[in-house]
Image (spheres, rainbow, N blue to C red):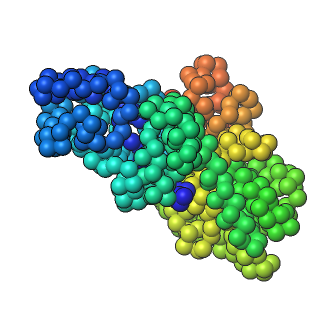
Amino acid sequence: MSENTADLTVGFDLDMTLIDTVPGFSRMLEVLGEELGVEFPVAEMTAALGPPLEHMLEPHLPQAQIAAAGDRFRELYPAHAIEPVGELPGAHEALAAVRRHRGRVVVVTGKFTDNARRHLEHLGLDVDVLEGWVWGVGKAEVLRRESASIYVGDHVHDVEGALAADALSVSVMTGGCTREALVAAGTHVVLDSLLEFPAWLDEHLLSTRLTALENDLRSRGSLLVAYSGGADSAFLLAAAVRALGADRVVAATGYSHSLPEVERDPARQFAAALGVEVLTPQTHEMEREGYRANGADRCFFCKAELVEVLDAIARDRGIDVVATGTNADDAVAGFRPGIRAADERGALAPLRDAGLTKAQVREVSRRWGLPTWDKPAAACLSSRVAYGVEVTPHRLARVERAEAAVRAVLPQVRNLRVRDLGDSASVEVDAELLPLSEHDANRVRTVVSETGFGTVAVDPQGFRSGSMNQALIEG
């Protein structure tokens, strides 16, 4: 089996995997039998759906009639067999699970393509690719072409197709094959129905991606982690220690005006608990004109400064590589100039490369007992300053004081940003806390004003990570 951990394509069979073909197929056998004057054993034939239609007709018709009977079956099919057929339990949820992981859905079926498409459209089953009239090992060509790493079916011939494509075979017990037959055919996984598929897929991808991460980290002789203390970099640090040992891992936190004081001690304590040496080099992004100008590419200059400082430390210490905590969600989040700066300077992104998402990082962190598993996102202070407003030490210190003041009057707040809009400030708190009482809103406006802002408003939309980027897009 081969699997690209970052790109997911899942193949599905159609009949008796996604849809319950029995009512439609039964009706078609009755209609065709009436035309041909043949009484087909409907119960027997529908108990073993899966093989091509012509194969199923062979025991019941003269050889010379089979091709024409098959053509007539497909011609009559839309009028008689689409409406009675429903989806099997869990079909929509299974496809949604693939989408949730940003995956593609490919349906590869022995059914006539046009009729297969009619079923999908009638039931609202959302797929990216449909390939019909493909049977058994012939499905492998399509699965390989579409880079499918998983193929889900109900028949032993679906197993054959998956194995021939070097894909992981997942079988569901909704067709006519027994568990013993599916296992004997070589399937890797047997599920009672597609209702079990979402949870299985979640765990499979998590396990696969963790293995990819571990293998990647083990291949590095030593590692310097760009460590902010957030959930991602903390998880990467813990994973690196597991893979390499604490003596071959170093954590480095760039200290500058943009790193809140409140973040520093907890970060050091976490790394120390892992037995990792923590370095706190000063970074000087404020000396870079592009950073101070605070254009849309500000993060590029910040990350460039950080990686260049850490690269120098790594070389001096004989450490092989520098790695950041960029995850797979970050890589598709749109405008991320900081990621580009790190990539251009050769920094690794092991979480991203393994396909690990933010949710997966938090889940594994929870399982490992890391205190950062549910830590709120804590972007640098510069991210609070509106684009085009110059970043200065004074502005960053003012934002930090303002956020500390808000937390003092609203201790229940979890996610908080005080956005510096120039002379005014916009305060974002957890949406579930809104609207604030008039008393709390007045206290927030007062304490933020006392830190040096002229006018202060509480954002009615609440906390939104990256809201400054949204304003940039809208502008």
Compared to residue 205, the image places residue 287 above or below, namely below
Q: Does residue 4 appear to the left or right of 254 in the view shown?
A: left
Compared to residue 27, the image places residue 381 above or below, namely below
The residue depicted at 74 percent of the width and 29 percent of the height is 411
Compared to residue 236, the image places residue 10 above or below, namely above
The residue depicted at 24 percent of the width and 33 percent of the height is 60
Is 329 or 305 nearer to us in this picture? 329
Q: Does residue 304 appear to the left or right of 84 in the view shown?
A: right
Is 405 or 238 nearer to us in this picture? 238
The residue depicted at 78 percent of the width and 80 percent of the height is 318
Q: Is residue 68 visible from the viewing direction of this image?
A: yes
Residue 426 image-quadrant placement: top right
Q: Horizontal and vertical percent for residue 13?
A: 39, 42
Compared to residue 148, the image places residue 415 above or below, namely above
Q: Horizontal and vertical percent for residue 365?
A: 73, 45
The residue depicted at 47 percent of the width and 48 percent of the height is 159
Q: Quadrant of the N terminus?
A: bottom right
Q: Is residue 381 visible from the viewing direction of this image?
A: no
Q: Horizontal and vertical percent for residue 268?
A: 83, 55
